[in-house]
Image: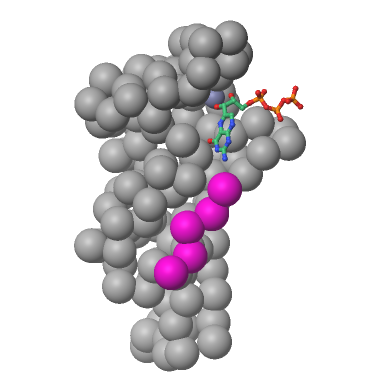
């Protein structure tokens, strides 16, 4: 199996609305998110690529236009944009474009990451 991965970064705010009163993450706060998109394939194209990594800049453009410097609760009209939940959203966006999409990992803080890998 061949695998490639590319990182993308954005900054955004969110609040986890359904957490109990007093939990700090119930308040609006921000993160510098790092998204890692992974693609996997048993085969390579004629150039020797799974996918040209340049093509993956479509995700960078979508992140810049949709997520960067925005309030994620508003973007998704969702009360709890957790890192896990966001991994699945980005995974589905990528899978619709690149069938080789195999996982999306998001680093929310230097100490926390989540991954969606079917
Ligand atoms: N399973 C999850 N748990 C939590 C998530 C999440 O996405 N998935 N998110 C949060 C908050 O967004 C929060 O911002 C996390 O950051 P922080 O409280 O700073 O957590 P740290 O572990 O980095 O900080 P400590 O001070 O070490 O606790 C909460 N939970
Ligand atoms: Zn948070």
- Front one among 97 and 48: 97
How many numbered callouts?
0
Lateral position of residue 7 relative to residue 90, left or right: right
58 relative to 61, above or below = below
The residue sitting at 33% across, 47% down in the picture is 89
The residue sitting at 40% across, 32% down in the picture is 81
Magenta stretch in the rendered image: 114-118
Lateral position of residue 58 relative to residue 83, left or right: left
User: Ligand 1 is found in which quarter of the picture?
Assistant: top right
Q: Quadrant of the N terminus?
A: bottom right
Residue 69 lies, in percent from the top left, at: 40, 18
Residue 19 lies, in percent from the top left, at: 49, 22
The stretch drawn in magenta includes residue 11? no
Q: Quadrant of the C terminus?
A: bottom left
Residue 95 lies, in percent from the top left, at: 30, 64
51 relative to 22, above or below = below
Residue 65 seen in the figure: no
Residue 53 lies, in percent from the top left, at: 44, 61
**Residue 31 occupies which quadrant of the picture?**
top right
- Front one among 87 and 82: 82
Q: Residue furthest right?
A: 111
The residue sitting at 28% across, 29% down in the picture is 78
Q: Looking at the magenta stretch, what is its main secondary structure?
A: strand
């Amino acid at each position: 199996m061949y695998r490639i991965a590319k990182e993308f970064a954005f900054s955004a705010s969110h609040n986890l609305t359904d957490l109990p009163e007093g939990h700090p993450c119930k308040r609006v706060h921000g993160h510098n998110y790092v998204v890692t998109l992974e693609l996997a394939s048993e085969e390579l194209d004629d150039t020797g690529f799974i996918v040209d990594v340049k093509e993956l800049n479509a995700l960078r453009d979508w992140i810049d236009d949709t997520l960067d410097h925005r309030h994620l609760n508003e973007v998704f009209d969702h009360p709890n944009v957790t890192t896990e939940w966001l991994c699945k959203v980005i995974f589905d966006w990528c899978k619709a474009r690149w069938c080789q999409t195999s996982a999306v990992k998001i680093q929310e803080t230097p100490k926390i990451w989540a991954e969606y890998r079917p």
